[in-house]
Image (tube, helix red, strand yellow):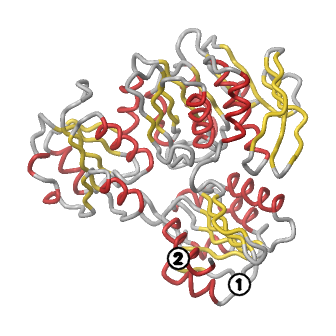
Amino acid sequence: MNKAFKEKVYLVGIGGIGMSALARYFHAMGHQVIGYDKAINQMTKRLQAEGIGVTHINEEDAVPHPFREKEEVLVIYTPAIPKDDAILNYFKENGFECLKRAEVLGLLSKGIFTIAVAGTHGKTTITSMIAHLLKKGNKKFNAFLGGISRDFGTNLILDPEAEIMLTEADEFDRSFLQLHPNILVVSSVDLDHLDIYESEKDLLDTYSKLIDQIVVKGKLFSHFGIAERLNSKNDVSIKEYAIEEDKAEVSIERIRIESGNYVFDLKQEGKLIENLVCGLPGIHNVENAAVAASVALAVGVDQKIIKEALSSFRGVQRRFDVHINTSEFVYIDDYAHHPKELESLIKSIRQLYPTRKITMVFQPHLFSRTKDFGEEFGEVLATCDELILLEIYPARELPIEGIDSRWLSAKVNKEGVPICQKAQLMNILKSRNVDLLVTAGAGDIDTMVEPIIDYYA
């Protein structure tokens, strides 16, 4: 048991990818762990199978009596929980110790060498790549991942003798300001979460504060051009990475495709690692692989091991998941929920399947994000051959008047875009001759994966 925390831990929003990793951590450490989540999904089912209690009833009475003694219980919650949540309000109103998920990660990172991965896009893939390289390099570490690694089969990696903590640094709710990393990666600073950030300047200022929190003699790895946009006062070692950029300390060179994989050379501080292999689709994943390799080098993983390990990295669930790939039909599922992510997804599909006709089913995530980026969503979604829109997944939000999937469809330069509930989707798909199908979104669209596979397989 981690004696820095109370014996009993209750997680509000336990089914979220970040929250479930904390649930698994405390359960593995010997704490009594239960929680609430409104969703019944594969994650909550897996937690229950692992011996972690989950309720889907959002009422005060759903809190069992052993978890009503406030001196014995730590409550962890995600800021994605609505303010009117009955269970969280019960705990707060009765004086329980209630910490946000990010606060707990901050406490867990104290006193241990910490690698944090930040950025609007790419966090989960980069973090999972680093974890894979550290494991192959026999490093002792704990890792909290924002997705299910295909290599580890989980979003939590634990070592009782851990000397390193690896975690994603989430910009939502300014959560990453709880961290003081030794190594920080910043992959991108595209504007997002305008329900949190007032402007692009506000977002950049917050990233600057995170960089200011890198410890003395720490390192920053950032995509080329990001550092000059920030106002950090920290005299930290900065290593920028980019493709074919002479001014970058980490340069990705001689990119080519061999046997369906990207192959490239990595030049860093005069050292050259030749013929690195990245099997993931999309040129953005070459950049992700390069910075992951650079971080592994920085903590002492041997070049030869990095080269061997990177070629065997299998990726993360819901990141370009190819579920069916036959001459008649292809089905891909992806977590993309921001216009930039959708753009990368569609470009990767076009590159791998240039003759296929793309039918995309997109579930917008959040009313606010849909409203704030309506024009950008419209432009990128129009590049699909056919589009089907699910209704907006609200997550933590209340509806915004006039903002729905019909409003979004008007931003897309296409005739007759169907808008439907999940329950109607299969009937629409069955009525069409679909060549390549892609489902995308960060809500609960993943619950449609199995029905789609069952029909088309």
Position above or below: 442 against 316:
below
Q: Position of residue 140 (x, y in %)?
A: 48, 23
Q: Secondary structure at mark 1?
A: loop
Residue 169 or 191: which is nearer the viewer? Answer: 169
* Label whose residue precedes the other's in the sequence (2 or 1): 1
Badge 1, how many Cα within 10 Å: few under 14, some, many 20+? few
Image quarter (top left, top right, bottom left or bottom right) of the C terminus = bottom right
Give the position of the N terminus as an image quadrant: top left
Residue 363 place in picture, x, y as percent: 57, 67
Q: Quarter-wise, where is residue 243 in the image?
A: top right
**Res. 85 image quadrant:** bottom left
Asked if residue 393 is positioned above or below residue 235 in the image, the reply reads below
Mark linked to residue 416: 1
Q: Are marks 2 and 1 in contact (CB under 8 Å)?
A: no
Left or right: where 144 falls relative to 270? left
- Residue 287 at x, y percent in the picture: 75, 37
Q: Label 2 sits on what residue type?
A: Pro
Residue in the picture at 74% in, 32% down: 290
The numbered disc on residue 451 is: 2
User: Residue 187 lies in what quarter of the image?
Assistant: top right
The circle drawn on residue 72 is none
> What residue is at 70 percent from the left and 25 percent from the top?
294
Give the spatial CA distance, label 2 vs label 1.
Answer: 24 Å
Q: Position of residue 300 (x, y in %)?
A: 63, 17
Amino acid type, callout 1 = Gly
113 is higher (above) or lower (below) than 84: above
Q: Residues within 10 Å of mark 2 (few under 14, many from 20)?
A: few
Tell me which residue sits at (49%, 32%) in the image. Answer: 176
Per the image, label 2 sits on a secondary structure element best described as helix
